[in-house]
Image: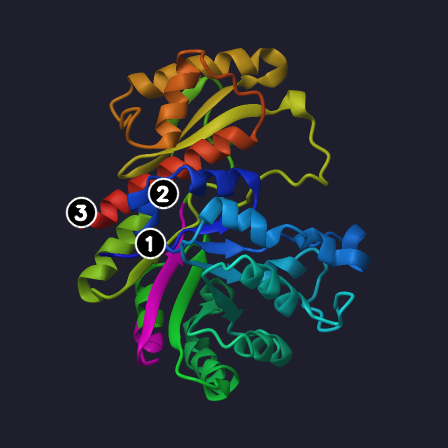
Amino acid sequence: MTIYYPVLRVSPAEMNAYETLKESTKHQIIPVLEAKRISRDSKETWWNTYNTLGSYLKGKLNDNLFIYDFKQSFDKLGEVDEHLVDENRMNVIKHCSRKLDESEMKFIPCVHFDSPQWYIQSVINLQKSKLAIRVRCKDFNATMDQIVLQTIYNNVIDNLQQPTQLILILDFANKPTSPERIQKAIEMFSKLEHAQLVLSLTTCPEDASNVGAMSFDVAAEREDYRIFRGLAEKYPNLAFSDYTVRPTGEPDKEARIDYYNTYIKVFYTTHNSYMIGKSTLIKDNGIDTFHEVCQEIIDSDVYQGSDFSAGSYAIKQCADRIVVVSNHSKPIEYGINHHIELTASQLRQN
């Protein structure tokens, strides 16, 4: 069975999207969870950000395996700070890991190829049998591949204290690249023996700006999956990862957004494309017109049926006016849920 590694944030929409997946799909995926970001305002008592981390994820993921990436905790702070410690002098990695262990979560810790040594050592000290290494290929060109590989050996592999199964995530994110560039990276990092190689990329648009109001239209082709399928023929052990349909995540709660000048929109993935259904502006009766957009989706040739995914079912409920969508979070949830179900289905068939 081909394992799928969707990248998800620890946010309500994305965790709800996971929670409502079919059980068979949950057994086929290992999500890469990006940590909740610590805000600058809460830096002095940052540990409160993770008060319910273990119990919350336990309720969403139960006993299913996932990769946990600590790096995003520091995104808003500007640097990965070794001196950011809790009341018990534990750093972010140790603090969050303890929360997950207390809830008996099955997780694989993640480091980045360029993580500082204290960070890498903190993860190694967790003594987990599996370790994920995220290589942000989007940040460098092919001439750096050899140097990055050697860095992984020097900073991570040579410091492991026990036999450890490695998962190497080659992360191209949404940066335009060619199959040739990706193939060069695969060839180089395949030299890391006994590691599961995962290709992570997306061609999903970051927003719905290229789709008109009151429409359901193609926003982009799924070049990401097409590239993977082409490479998988040559590298049959290569696994797939993407950013589902929301590369930029949910709207930042700290950002000031003019709600009434926004659209309600839902991403609906098909076998070959990313499509978007988009209402009128909320101030122009957008909540009501979104029902009509959902009706257009279920009347289309690409609609998979209400029983295909929880997301598809919710869109049908909205079209039938049983459900009213008045926020941006729920359509994100629907789109991500449907995308994961469809991608997992495609991987099973190939």
Three-letter amino acid code of the residue under disc 3: Gln
Tell me what residue is drawn at x 27 percent, y 64 percent.
238
Q: Mark 2 = which residue? A: 340
Question: Is 188 in the magenta?
Answer: yes
Q: Is residue 89 visible?
A: yes
Q: Is residue 247 visible?
A: no
- Name the quarter where the N terminus is drawn: bottom left
Tell me: residue 139, above or below residue 158. Answer: above
Confirm or deny contact between disc 2 and disc 1 (CB under 8 A).
Answer: yes
Task: Report x, y in % for residue 320.
Answer: 40, 11
Quarter residue 79 falls in: bottom right
Tell me what residue is drawn at x 50 percent, y 42 percent.
14
Crowding at dot 3, Cα within 10 Å, few <14 / some 14-19 / many 20+, comes out as few
Circle 2 — which element? helix
Three-letter amino acid code of the residue under disc 1: Tyr
**Considering depth in this image, is 149 or 68 the residue closer to the camera?**
68
Task: Report x, y in % for residue 98.
Answer: 60, 65
**Considering depth in this image, is 329 or 248 the residue closer to the camera?**
329
Q: Mark 3 = which residue? A: 349
Tell me what residue is drawn at x 58 percent, y 73 percent.
115
- Magenta-drawn segment: 187-203
Task: Report x, y in % for residue 300.
Answer: 29, 20
Q: Mark 1 = which residue? A: 4
